[in-house]
Image: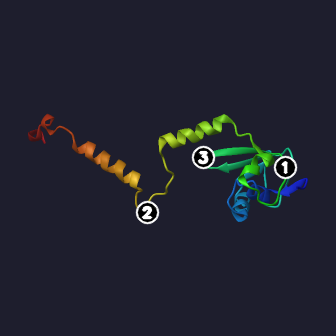
Amino acid sequence: MSEQARIDKWLWAVRIYKTRSIAAEACKKGHISIGCRTAKPAHNIRVGDIVNVKKSPITYSFKVLKCAENRVGAKLVPELMENVTPKEQYEILEMSKISGFTDRARGTGRPTKKERRDLDQFVEESYDLDFEEFDFDEL
């Protein structure tokens, strides 16, 4: 293990991203920052750096314990990095899971099974109104 490593290789090596090309793409899009500065894929990191990874809806923070450019087994990941993500970020994640809101653009296809069930339930509830309360002669 060397004293420094490319950020895209390190993100792939510690299994934050599935492939190195996805890690490099995240760097290019500005989703990766070291300290307060956004990092390009070829940026070198050192032991002690704090790497921030934006994965919607939260930003994860990792402290570099060792530099590696080759992918390691999942059991060895804690030796290379430490998760220092604040608890507030995980609370944001829980809130987004509870709300059930999915960020899907309008017109991007059919509703999911869950969305369809919710829609059917809503329509059923709206038709279950008691029509005896209404005076149709006034209409």
Considering the numbered disc 2 on the image, is that residue within a helix, a strand or a loop?
A: loop
Which mark, residue 80? none
Give the percent coordinates (x, y) of residue 117. 35, 50
**At 90% from the left edge and 55% from the top edge, which residue is drawn?**
2
Tell me if residue 3 comes above or below residue 134 in the rendering. Answer: below
- Residue with the mark numbered 2: 109
Badge 3 amino acid:
Pro
**At 73% from the left edge and 52% from the top edge, which residue is drawn?**
32
Judged left or right of residue 51, residue 117 is: left
Label 3: few (<14), some (14–19) or many (≥20) C-alpha neighbours in 10 Å: few
- Residue with the mark numbered 3: 57
Q: How many marks?
A: 3
Q: Quadrant of the C terminus?
A: top left
- Residue with the mark numbered 1: 66
Circle nearer the viewer, 1 or 2: 1
Label 2: few (<14), some (14–19) or many (≥20) C-alpha neighbours in 10 Å: few
